[in-house]
Image: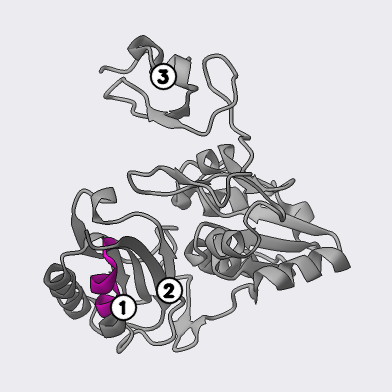
Amino acid sequence: MAIQRIVLFYAFTPVADPEAIRLWQRALCEQHGLTGRIIISQDGINVTLGGELQALKQYVKSTKEYFKGVDVKWSDGGAADFPRLSVKVRSEIVSFGAPGELKVDQNGVIGGGKHLRPEELHELVDQKEVVFFDGRNAFEAQIGKFKNAVVPEVATTRDFIAELDSGKYDDLKDKAVVTYCTGGVRCEVLSSLMVNRGFSEVYQLDGGIVRYGEKYRDAGLWEGSLYVFDQRMRMEFSEEAKTIGSCVRCGEPSSDFHNCANLACRTLNLYCTDCASEPANLRCPEGCESLVG
């Protein structure tokens, strides 16, 4: 059986005709039998695809002819981790709800945070007090995050602007803030939004948690599992990964998310193996009983 993998990358660069890029990308993926998700905007492209390794390599080679210099990340998995192929044009490749605020040129995002490679992050932490700022949805941090990180109370990426404008984090504006997210794309935008709002020393983890985990696994500043948006739900960097989440029913350690059984809710909650084995338990302990489902 052919080796399967998942490939992830993004590029912030001006795209003159997003619809033409969409048609080209869909045809390219269909040609190579790939499934997954591609989002294209006037500001760039965001890609997560699964398939046979050689097919993915051919896809990446062709795509790099237009989107040059992208940081390609590979992960275990394959086409089976994605139910279908989705290639869409949107106003943003990450939906912060601020398409007019982000500025990009051929070199990427203009005015964002300073990129730090994993080893440079450690050097910075050795030099000064650093605040880690999670750039993901809050539930993702339930199973993994950087030690002592600030985790904003956001359910979706679109909540970040209101969260930043709320004043909750104004005390961080004169501190060294390192934003991080899964692969780096959300932090490209988030760090720019923070700079625009007066945060004076903003960094972003280059390549995101994925690149950091590849280098330090579970022997660095990261704790727990990494939530991923495919059928795997999560991944670990080593067998030494901590379990920092807990079952919403009994409090036992868990990193396993399950959707609420209420079809009108479907909120992701953590359940231990024992609690998840009882279908009646797979409902939010509170907050969704009044929904129709």
Quarter of the view holding residue 73: bottom left
Check if residue 194 falls in the magenta segment.
Answer: no
Dot 1 surroundings within 10 Å: few (below 14), some, or many (20 or more)? some
Relative to 22, say whether 48 is above or below.
above
Of callouts 2 and 1, which one flags the residue occurring earlier in the amino acid sequence? 1
Say which of 120 and 204 sits in front.
120
Residue 276 badge: 3
Q: Amino acid at mark 3?
A: Ala
Image-based side of 144 in relation to 265, left or right:
right
Q: Amino acid at mark 2?
A: Val
Q: Which residues are magenta?
A: 50-60
Q: Residue at x 79, y 53 (%)?
A: 171
Image-based side of 90 in relation to 106, left or right:
left
The image position of residue 103, as x and y in percent, is 48, 78
Q: How many marks?
A: 3
Element class at badge 1? helix
Q: Which residue is mark 1?
A: 60
